[in-house]
Amino acid sequence: GNTITILGVESSCDDTAAAVVRDSGGRAEILSSVVYGQTGLHAPFGGVVPEIAARAHAEKIDLCVEEALKTAGLSLDSLDAIAVTAGPGLIGGVIAGVMCAKGLAAGSGLPLLGINHLAGHALTPRLTDALDFPYLMLLVSGGHCQFVIVEGPNSFSRLGGTIDDAPGEAFDKTAKLLGLPQPGGPSVESAALGGDPARFDFPRPLLDRPGCDMSFSGLKTALLRARNAVVAEKGGLTEQDRADLAAGFQAAVADVLAEKSRRAISEYIALAPAQPVLAVAGGVAANQTIRGILETVCTNAAVHFVAPPLALCTDNAAMIAWAGIEHFRLGLVDEAELVARPRWPL
Ligand code: KG4
Ligand code: ZN
């Protein structure tokens, strides 16, 4: 009938994930969502190591799929299709997922859908909040940072994005420079709680240029310089120095995202959407200061602010299964020639 059940598989960065999502004509339900994080494996290196990631994905992915099916109480033959992240991402990991999904599809005769990881993030607000097209999306994580108008399951307009680092990456590097634990986002956020954001002068890159492009690598350099100046003067960092540096850095990121969001919103509003919405996804959207400033921007622009629950904002396979459902309804099925793509813009 109208009910579609899809297994999603995700392995493009440092999370191995599988999930089963069912859509009964407009009512979607996550039957299972299993995520094996690799943070512990990469922590000693201060960033994701592609070879370690690929190996861990290959090791865990079958188990992850098995667990997702078991939790959903389903076997492969009760599914309608298999959806897998086919890029963009670390190629070794993407290949591990694609091989696994191809094997399952070949063995079961189920159709296979190759999903763009970014489309997975961008369509998540339709899984959680049943949003109508078009809505404005800000993807902001350790790997991505871009504004996209989501016009349909396979139709996206990119308004702009980072020209260098993603903000999550900058948070992670900031944590490393301040001697705080990884992942950096949460530890910088808590260090910033007692800090004075105005003590150090951080730049707001690219605000003088029109458009929605952003840059975060200069902030990292500014942080390094400010930290080194304090260390040179006092021989080390006090708790207060750390708090002030963290707060200054975080405020700069928040200001840049806020101003660029204002611009993205005005481009989006020009399309005259019936119910204007800005939705966010990505780990950085968990940051309370950033979330707060974006909510204010939205309130002032009479735009509804939507933030899916954090477990669906960060990398997961339910978003891939859901994107699979949206594509399946449009008949966008890939067959065995599906290939893993390290780069794949929306
Ligand atoms: O979406 P995500 O789990 O993975 C991808 O990068 O795709 O995002 C992880 C990133 C990390 O860089 C992490 O430091 C950052 O999101 N992050 C945060 C916060 N929580 C996680 N950044 C700022 N504030 C947070 N509270
Ligand atoms: Zn992601």
Image (tube, rainbow, N blue to C red):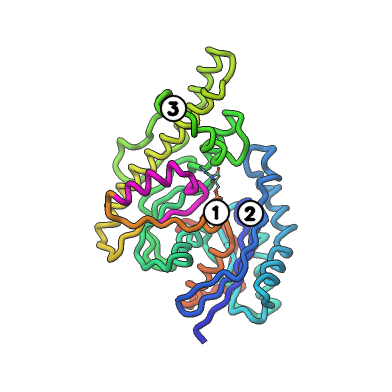
User: Can you see residue 171?
Assistant: yes
Q: Which mark is residue 314?
A: 1
Q: Are marks 3 and 1 in contact (CB under 8 Å)?
A: no
Front-most of 142 and 34? 34
Identify the residue shown where x is 65% and y is 72%.
72
Say which label, 3 or 2, has the lower sequence index: 2
Residue 215: name its quadrant.
top left
Instruction: Give the camera-side residue of 313 and 329.
Output: 313
**Residue type at tag 2:** Asp
Nearer the observer, 235 or 155: 235
Cα distance in 3D space between marks 3 and 1? 29 Å
- Helix, strand, or loop for circle 1? loop
Expressed as whole percent of the image width and height from the top left, the position of residue 87 reads: 56, 58
Mark 1 vs mark 2: in front: 1
Is the residue marked 1 within 8 Å of ligand 1, measured from its CB? yes
Q: Tell me which secondary structure the magenta stretch mostly adopts.
A: helix
- Residue 150 included in the magenta stretch of the image: no
Q: Secondary structure at mark 2?
A: strand
Looking at numbered disc 3 in the image, what kind of residue is underneath it?
A: Asp
Residue at the image position 55 percent from the left and 41 percent from the top? 186
